[in-house]
Image (cartoon, rainbow, N blue to C red):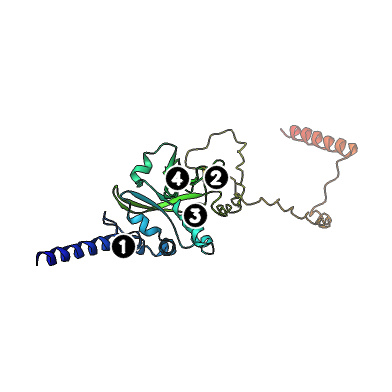
């Protein structure tokens, strides 16, 4: 009876060991596929993790950071061999915990160890990526292989379970030289110059020396509309002077001046009248 109980306990223990070893759920309580299922724009990335079995390796880690790529940018990996996809995605799994708070405290450039480095297949720093901090809380990522440019930009923090797992979204896959065809970032859009501003109408200064009172600027300011030249008035037509009427005849004819003989005769008459008057006295 005791042997039967011991045998049963051994079977149960073996089943439990097999269950936990085959489970994709981490002993730390996270499942990368379940985390990504809450973000529809990352489902293509999640499918590639499942195809390459990288999800199982991620869930076994105690501390991990995943650089996820959205559906519109991951398409360049779909047609590649499974082993090549696995190597490339292994570079997106960082063997440390980085969330937004930790990113802000990083130096200008830091080197991160990836899961691909732990495979033993990495050459010439293929298993490392560089993170460069830019002004304004911006970050760019690229392979640590010499002369490799930063190709992926930090987009946002997707998920974090402090000090266990963090998921950060980046703009495109990071392909280390030698792991496959490098995916370069798209060229920037062509420069479009801003529209030219219309010229401002100049305000001519008045020639008057007298100061203009405040608030009267609008009244005395010249109009912005063009000034029309004054229209010349037509010359007046010559007016004919009325014909001069002949002088009207005088009612009485002017008396002719008296002659010298008449004056003498008149004086003699006056003298004679004087003597006659004296004779009668």
The residue beneath circle 4 is 139
Q: Nearer the viewer, mark 3 or mark 4?
A: 3
Whichever of callouts 1 and 4 sits on the residue coming sooner in the sequence is 1
Whichever of callouts 2 and 3 sits on the residue coming sooner in the sequence is 2
Tell me the number on the disc at residue 149: 2
Tell me the number on the disc at residue 173: 3
Mark 1 vs mark 3, CA separation in Å: 29 Å
Residue 279 lies left or right of residue 139; in this view the side is right
- In terms of secondary structure, where does tag 4 sit? strand
Q: Quadrant of residue 137?
A: top left
State the residue at coordinates (90%, 38%). Answer: 261
Q: Quadrant of the N terminus?
A: bottom left
Task: Tell me, yes or no, if residue 214 can be seen here.
Answer: yes
- In terms of secondary structure, where does tag 3 sit? loop
Tell me residue 32's x, y (percent): 34, 59
Circle 1 packing at 10 Å, graded few (<14), some (14-19), many (20+), is: few
Q: Nearer the viewer, mark 2 or mark 4?
A: 2
Q: Are marks 2 and 3 in contact (CB under 8 Å)?
A: no
Tell me the number on the disc at residue 22: 1
Mark 3 vs mark 4, CA separation in Å: 15 Å
Tell me residue 185's x, y (percent): 55, 52
Mark 1 vs mark 2, CA separation in Å: 39 Å
Tell me residue 276's x, y (percent): 78, 35
Mark 2 vs mark 4, CA separation in Å: 13 Å
State the residue at coordinates (83%, 51%). Answer: 253
State the residue at coordinates (60%, 42%). Answer: 203
- In terms of secondary structure, where does tag 1 sit? helix
Whichever of callouts 1 and 3 sits on the residue coming sooner in the sequence is 1
Residue nearest the viewer, comparing 98 with 79: 79
Q: Quadrant of the C terminus?
A: top right
Mark 1 vs mark 4, CA separation in Å: 37 Å
């Amino acid at each position: 009876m005791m042997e039967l109980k011991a045998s049963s306990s051994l079977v149960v223990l073996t089943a439990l060991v097999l269950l936990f070893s085959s489970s994709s759920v981490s002993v730390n309580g996270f499942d990368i596929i379940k985390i990504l299922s809450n973000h529809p724009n990352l489902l293509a990335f999640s499918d590639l993790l499942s195809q390459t079995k990288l999800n199982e390796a991620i869930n076994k880690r105690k501390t991990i950071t995943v650089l996820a790529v959205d559906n519109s940018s991951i398409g360049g990996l779909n047609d590649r061999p499974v082993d090549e996809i696995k190597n490339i995605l292994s570079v997106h799994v960082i063997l440390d915990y980085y969330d937004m708070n930790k990113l802000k405290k990083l130096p200008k450039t830091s080197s991160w160890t990836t899961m691909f480095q732990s495979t033993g297949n990495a050459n010439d720093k293929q298993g490392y990526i560089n993170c460069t901090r830019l002004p304004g809380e911006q970050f760019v990522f690229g392979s640590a292989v010499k002369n490799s440019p930063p190709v992926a930009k930090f987009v946002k923090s997707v998920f974090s379970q402090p000090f266990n797992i963090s998921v950060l979204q980046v703009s495109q896959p990071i392909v280390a030289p030698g792991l496959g065809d490098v995916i370069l970032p798209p060229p920037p859009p062509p420069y479009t110059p801003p529209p030219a501003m219309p010229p401002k109408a100049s305000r001519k200064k008045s020639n008057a020396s007298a100061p203009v009172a405040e608030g009267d600027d609008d009244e005395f300011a010249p109009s912005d509309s063009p000034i029309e030249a004054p229209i010349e008035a037509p010359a007046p037509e010559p007016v004919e002077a009325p014909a001069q009427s002949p002088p009207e005849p005088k009612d009485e004819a002017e008396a002719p001046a008296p002659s010298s003989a008449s004056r003498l005769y008149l004086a003699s008459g006056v003298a004679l009248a004087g003597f006659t008057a004296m004779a009668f006295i």
